[in-house]
Image: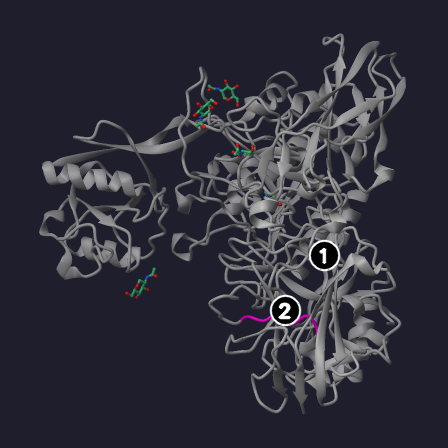
């Protein structure tokens, strides 16, 4: 293999059963009632080329000499000529596979090419709709979470609001004309820098149309969420009239818009945006790149650039992901990369909600407007002549004449919201209330209507119907909204992804406020609103880092790792909801940021997070921390071990090693033996403390994640506060965990018939759609899956029939990404030519597939660290 990239080179062709290229990890998209979730994020024919030289002319030399050297049309989508990355994003424009192959071969053979990786699609950040849970009121309710994080004290006592710090944001654009976001763009404005790399119509798959203005003016009809405006407000919003205050309200923002109004983004655009953020002089970059895959190592260029940015002194803050409901190993890339500061989500203590009151109903009803909230107080009437059916208001004939001049009450279901509302409007309704047809709140997007629309829950809707049936009901709207407590405020959000990183590295690292966060929205979405997600927690921490950077003033900057550790040292460990038990570090990292302490406290502990790995790892059992007094007073300290809840990832009796979704809490405590229990630290002095872990005595079969905090207790609180260092480990050996789920891998055909290990599959290459499809489902992440083709008679390996199955995340049992599917096009890399640059057609014959997955933390050289599946006979006809 000449180029390092090749072993990681999943080439995908969109079509089915194409010649040479389909072989490599071609995840396909077919509809099958059982296996319906396989789709590839790789864009066919597009590649990121990285050059060996740093020369500015490398790109043009490459394209000029190549245009003559290859037969396919070469298009350049992005040019990167940068100290951190010199390369191109290209498209090979040909429908002929042989030409595609030879062109790519020509590129790989060039001495100026360092690596070639496929272009991938990255999903839009996900917004969680949380069930609203009311809790008890405290004395000074505020929808702003800054009392929970000491940000209020940084503002008021330190007079630090982040002035002069530039935070770069890669997101959906920003409505900077919003009064809380500065009202303009460019020098002198809050949003001082930025660029639109893609344009409104960009979906990830079409050609970006860049322009210099990152304004989000998508409009309500586009279905856009206003995500970038929301996160920008969290970081740096400020409005005097409402006292809305972001974390760093005087910081500047640079918005690099990488999403159109809807759809995804390809990673070559994200790479460009990261480099632009660096060039803009960003101190902090907050980005959203989400693949729920817990591997910290990848061969992807953007993870590489994330690590390089951090080395250059730019803090990169990334959300952990929103898959906590799916249990362990759900943190996502590139948050898993070593240098990223990866953020879990904590619930806000208050949310604000618009509320309506109805005569005859003795409690408030929460509502959310569709677009700008212009609905006015009025009588309400039931819209449909027969209320309570799915087809409520779907035809004009169904509408009750009672709605004339009133607000129409409509149930969700069967036809779209716009049709329902337009029917009611035609009958004279002046506004509409849509109620959900299932449990939970509703936030309806209703484009193309002329009357204002709001939505409410199913229960509230039914109660309104009952009240109207009794007599006339008048609705009064409280547009400003009222503040309500959140029951589980202060605890980790249930959606927040769980660690650890696949090889038991420490992730997530820290937590911010991400549940029920009130912030700015584009004016077309009514200017203000609540969103939830680790997408909200990451900018909270990005703003906190901006405050830290400001506090350094003109002094020499600390390294990013020092700053991150300082935040971890003084973070507040959160409790499991409704208990006094500390939550696990694999959920919360070091805990919720406490920004005032991070900035002002003078004792520093490194490292600031510990992983003991699993019980089989004797090297990790004994470790140390170093405590340094950087202040001017002597402090005495004691060390102790604060136990957190343990995490039970499986219920082995009931469901084997299928991860519990979500993971369960468990009571189990590790013992720590410290080299020193009490010590004194004079100014400028350091103390190293060594400790050895004795994991709890739980059954190793249960693979319990135990955890806690090394608590460095200060004996003179006025000279220095306590410090906590989170740790975790696993009882048992991860190497013993099964990788494939029972019944997997398996083979299906295009008609979705399944072929067991005894069945014969016949694949005639001359017959369209006759190829076998491997369906794989992993309970446990696997660093690599080997896909060998065996001669059915001799059982000898003749070659590889798929490549590129590296750094595989686990599949979920619920929700998305439950299976991965790979079709075979009948080609292979012969064992006799292991360096063959490209697969070639396999001769006709009878074969077996052998798929071997490397177990977690397994040694590839040890046979029993591989788990193996062998298929039934596959008869290949050419
Ligand atoms: C505005 O909010 C800050 C905290 O964010 C608080 O300290 C201050 O008292 C508030 N002012 C008013 C007038 O509510
Ligand atoms: C609603 O459905 C109608 C067809 O009944 C269609 O014409 C219209 O475009 C749809 N509107 C939206 C916003 O989807
Ligand atoms: C911050 O990053 C998260 C994910 O890492 C993303 O969802 C969010 O949009 C980003 N916020 C900003 C302001 O870029
Ligand atoms: C376990 O802890 C999580 C995280 O705090 C919490 O959301 C969940 O409710 C707890 N589960 C149980 C069964 O107590
Ligand atoms: C909280 O815990 C108490 C005591 O353990 C229990 O009675 C109560 O039902 C719990 N509340 C919730 C909302 O889970």
Cβ of mark 1 under 8 A from ligand 3: no
For residue 836, above or below residue 643? below
Residue named by callout 2? 43
Q: In terms of image quarters, where does ligand 5 lie?
A: top left
Q: Quadrant of the C terminus?
A: bottom right
Q: Nearer the viewer, residue 802 or 601?
A: 802
Q: Is residue 27 magenta?
A: yes
For residue 185, above or below residue 687? below
What percent of the width, then of the height, locates residue 63? 77, 74
What percent of the width, then of the height, locates residue 457? 31, 41
Instruction: Name which quarter of the figure residue 717 lies in.
Output: top right
For residue 560, above or below residue 260? above
**Prevailing secondary structure of the magenta residues:** loop
The secondary element bearing badge 1 is classed as strand
Q: Which residues are magenta?
A: 24-29
Residue named by callout 1? 782
Residue at left offset 69%, top offset 76% = 23
Q: Is residue 654 visible?
A: yes
Q: Is residue 135 left or right of residue 23?
A: left
The secondary element bearing badge 2 is classed as strand
**Eye-nearest disc, 1 or 2:** 1
């Amino acid at each position: 293999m000449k180029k390092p990239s090749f072993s990681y080179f999943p080439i995908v062709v969109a079509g089915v059963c194409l010649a040479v290229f389909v072989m490599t990890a071609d995840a396909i998209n077919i509809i099958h009632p059982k296996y319906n979730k396989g789709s590839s994020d790789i864009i066919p024919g597009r590649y990121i080329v990285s050059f060996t030289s740093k020369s500015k002319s490398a790109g043009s030399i490459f394209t000029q000499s190549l245009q003559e050297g290859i037969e396919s049309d070469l298009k350049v989508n992005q040019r990167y000529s940068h100290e951190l990355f010199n390369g191109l994003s290209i498209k090979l424009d040909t429908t002929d596979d042989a030409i595609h192959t030879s062109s790519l071969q020509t590129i790989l053979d060039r001495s100026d090419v360092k690596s070639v990786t496929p272009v991938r699609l990255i999903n839009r950040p996900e917004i969680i709709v949380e069930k609203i849970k009311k809790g008890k009121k405290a004395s000074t309710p505020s929808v702003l979470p800054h009392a929970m994080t000491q940000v209020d004290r940084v503002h008021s006592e330190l007079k630090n609001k982040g002035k002069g710090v530039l935070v770069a944001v890669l997101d959906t654009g920003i409505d900077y004309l919003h009064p809380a976001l500065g009202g303009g763009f460019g020098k002198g404005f809050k949003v001082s820098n930025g660029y639109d790399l893609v344009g409104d119509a960009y979906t990830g798959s079409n050609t970006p149309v860049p322009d210099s203005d990152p304004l989000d003016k998508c409009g309500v009809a586009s279905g856009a969420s206003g995500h970038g405006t929301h996160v920008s407000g969290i970081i740096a919003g400020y409005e005097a009239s409402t006292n809305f205050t972001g974390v760093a309200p005087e910081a500047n923002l640079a918005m690099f818009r990488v999403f159109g109004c809807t759809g995804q983004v390809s990673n070559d655009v994200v790479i460009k945006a990261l480099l632009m953020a660096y060039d803009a002089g960003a101190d902090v970059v907050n980005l959203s790149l989400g693949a729920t895959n817990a591997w910290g190592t990848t061969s992807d260029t953007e993870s590489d650039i994330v690590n390089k940015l951090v080395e250059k002194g730019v803090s990169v803050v990334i959300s952990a992901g929103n898959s906590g409901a799916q249990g362990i190993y759900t943190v996502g890339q590139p948050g898993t990369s070593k240098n990223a500061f990866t953020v879990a989500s904590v619930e806000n203590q208050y949310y604000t909600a618009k509320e309506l009151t109805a005569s005859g109903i003795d409690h408030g009803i929460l509502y959310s407007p569709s677009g700008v909230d212009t609905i006015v107080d009025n009588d309400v009437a039931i819209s449909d002549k027969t209320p309570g059916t799915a087809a409520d208001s779907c035809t004009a004939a169904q509408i009750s004449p009672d709605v004339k001049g009133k607000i129409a009450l409509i149930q969700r279901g069967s036809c779209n919201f716009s049709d329902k509302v337009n029917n009611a409007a035609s009958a004279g309704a002046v506004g509409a209330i849509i109620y959900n047809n299932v449990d939970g709140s509703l936030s309806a997007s209703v484009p193309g209507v002329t009357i204002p629309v709001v939505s409410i829950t199913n229960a509230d809707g039914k109660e309104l119907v009952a009240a109207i049936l009794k007599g006339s009901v008048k609705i009064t709207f409280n547009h400003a909204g009222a503040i309500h407590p959140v029951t589980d405020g202060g605890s980790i959000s249930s959606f927040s992804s769980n660690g650890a990183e696949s090889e038991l590295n420490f992730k997530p690292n820290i937590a911010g406020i991400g549940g029920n966060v009130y912030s700015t929205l584009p004016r077309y979405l009514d200017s203000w609103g609540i969103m939830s997600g680790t997408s909200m927690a990451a900018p909270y921490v990005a703003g906190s880092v901006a405050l830290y950077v400001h506090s350094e003033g003109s002094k020499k900057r600390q390294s990013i790792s020092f700053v991150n550790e300082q935040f971890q040292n003084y973070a507040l460990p959160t409790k499991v909801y409704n208990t006094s038990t500390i939550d696990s570090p694999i959920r919360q990292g070091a805990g919720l940021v406490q920004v005032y302490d991070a900035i002002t406290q003078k004792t520093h502990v490194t490292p600031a997070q510990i992983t003991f790995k699993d019980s089989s790892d004797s090297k990790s059992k004994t470790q140390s921390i170093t405590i340094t007094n950087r202040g001017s007073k002597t402090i005495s300290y004691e060390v102790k071990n604060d136990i957190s809840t343990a995490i039970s990832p499986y219920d082995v009796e009931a469901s084997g090693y299928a991860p519990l979704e979500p993971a369960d809490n468990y009571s189990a405590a590790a013992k720590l033996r410290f080299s020193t229990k009490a010590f004194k630290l004079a100014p400028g002095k350091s103390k190293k403390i060594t400790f050895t872990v004795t994991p709890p005595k739980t059954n190793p079969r249960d693979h319990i994640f135990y955890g806690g905090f090394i608590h460095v207790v200060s004996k003179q609180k006025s000279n220095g506060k306590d410090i906590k260092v989170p740790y975790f480990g696993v009882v048992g050996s991860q190497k013993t965990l099964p990788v494939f789920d029972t019944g997997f891998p398996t083979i299906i055909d295009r008609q979705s018939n399944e072929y067991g290990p005894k069945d014969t599959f016949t694949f005639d290459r001359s017959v369209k759609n006759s190829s076998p499809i491997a369906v794989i489902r992993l309970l446990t992440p696997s660093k690599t899956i080997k896909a060998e083709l065996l001669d059915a008679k001799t059982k000898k390996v003749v070659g590889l029939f798929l490549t590129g199955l590296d750094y595989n995340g686990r599949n979920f049992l619920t929700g998305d990404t439950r299976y991965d599917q790979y079709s075979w096009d009948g080609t292979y890399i012969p064992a006799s030519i292991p360096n063959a640059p490209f697969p070639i057609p396999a001769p006709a014959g009878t074969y077996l597939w052998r798929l071997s997955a490397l177990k977690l933390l397994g040694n590839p050289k040890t046979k029993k660290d591989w788990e193996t599946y062998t298929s039934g006979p596959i008869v290949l006809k050419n």
